[in-house]
Amino acid sequence: MACYKHSDREGVAQCNDCGRFLCAECADSFTTPLCVGCATERAAAIKGELIKNIAISVVLMIIGIVVIKSPLGILLAGIPYGWAILNRMTPSMFLWMSWVGWLIYFFIKLLLAYVIGLIALPIKLIKWIVELVSINRTLEGMGVK
Ligand SMILES: [Zn+2]
Ligand SMILES: [Zn+2]
């Protein structure tokens, strides 16, 4: 089978998503063997995901500002992210606790989530924006906006 783009070249690989044949040059265009159409689709999907993540964190910041009626409410936006990180490492030893223990545990966890979120959210935001910029550049390189 010939390459989907270069009919004079032998297809040496297949697009991971749609199975079209790719020549050596086309197979090397992206980190995984993909045709331009599927690579664009994947990039667009990642872009959508990044925009969603950024939008959610902005909404959380606005909620924080509204809840404590101060611009400092921005600092609360990291709590859900800190909480999610803590959930990944909460030890099961806490399971035997009474409700008082749970209450204390809850507040300690909330406090920790706040502290972790303070650091985690800006890092995540910067990462998302950097990825978004590089994806936009990739999409522009493919001739898609
Ligand atoms: Zn494809
Ligand atoms: Zn080709």
Image (cartoon, rainbow, N blue to C red):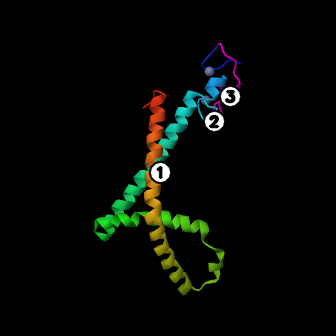
Q: Which residue is mark 2?
A: 32
Q: Circle 3 — which element?
A: strand
Q: Where residue 86 sits: x, y (%)?
A: 55, 68
Query: What's the distance in space between the residues labelled 3 and 1, CA to CA?
Result: 31 Å
Please tell me how crowded label 3 is: few (under 14), some (14-19), or many (20+) other residues with Cα within 10 Å. some
Query: Mark 3 or mark 2, which is nearer the start of the sequence?
Result: 3
Q: Which residues are magenta?
A: 8-21
Q: Quadrant of residue 76?
A: bottom left
Circle on res. 135: none
Query: What's the distance in space between the residues labelled 2 and 3, CA to CA?
Result: 10 Å
Give amino acid for label 2: Thr
Query: What's the distance in space between the residues labelled 2 and 1, CA to CA?
Result: 22 Å
Q: Residue at x 44, y 31 (%)?
A: 140
Q: Is residue 37 above or below residue 71?
A: above
Residue 56 is left or right of residue 10, and the answer is: left
Q: Residue at x 40, y 52 (%)?
A: 55
Q: Which residue is mark 1?
A: 127
Q: Where residue 65 sits: x, y (%)?
A: 31, 65
Quadrant of the drawing holding the C terminus: top left
